[in-house]
Image (spheres, rainbow, N blue to C red):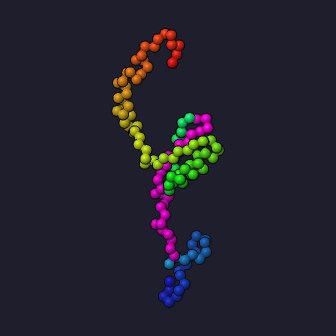
Amino acid sequence: MIPGDETPDVTAEGGHGAVPTTGVETGAGERPSRRTWPLYEVFVRGKRGLNHVHVGSLHAADDEMALHNARDVYTRRNEGVSIWVVRADAIAASSPDEKDPFFAPSADKVYRHPTFYAIPEEVPHL
């Protein structure tokens, strides 16, 4: 501003006409940025399926927004009957690098495998 002049400085950048550049509250910092929204994993149970299947991921500000966005994005053609949204940071998962040591203990328990049991001949099939 020019001293003694009460007219704010303005700019016409961006084709929006005269926009004040000083003395205007921008609201910066009041809302969380979309970049800081948590990541949600989306699971949908189809009409013919019994299990929920992972269909994708999305960012949302809260659980309710995640559920509504998941419905809009992943069930546009009425292909689902149930949706689960789970914050990705709440999921505990094994690492593919740990596959051998993590699953190795099950290999030494032969009683868990059907080859351990003798199947009687009168049983046609299992």
- 51 is higher (above) or lower (below) than 22: above
- Give the residue drawn at x 46%, y 57%: 36
Foreground of the two, 104 or 92: 92
Quarter occupied by residue 82? top right
Seen in the image, is 109 located left or right of residue 121? left
The stretch of residues the image draws in magenta is 24-49
Foreground of the two, 9 or 29: 29
Seen in the image, is 47 located left or right of residue 84? right
Q: Residue furthest top?
A: 121
- Give the residue drawn at x 61%, y 71%: 15
Instruction: Give the x, y percent position of residue 23.
Output: 50, 78
- 62 is higher (above) or lower (below) than 124: below
Q: Which residue lies furthest to the bottom in this view?
A: 4
- Give the residue drawn at x 40%, y 17%: 116
Q: How many marks?
A: 0
Foreground of the two, 116 or 37: 116
- Give the residue drawn at x 43%, y 13%: 118
Instruction: Give the x, y percent position of residue 37.
Output: 48, 56
Instruction: Give the x, y percent position of residue 120.
Output: 47, 11
Asked if residue 55 is among those painted magenta in the image, a careful observer would answer no
Asked if residue 36 is among those painted magenta in the image, a careful observer would answer yes
Foreground of the two, 109 or 26: 109
- 23 is higher (above) or lower (below) than 88: below
- 122 is higher (above) or lower (below) than 104: above
Instruction: Give the x, y percent position of residue 9.
Output: 53, 80
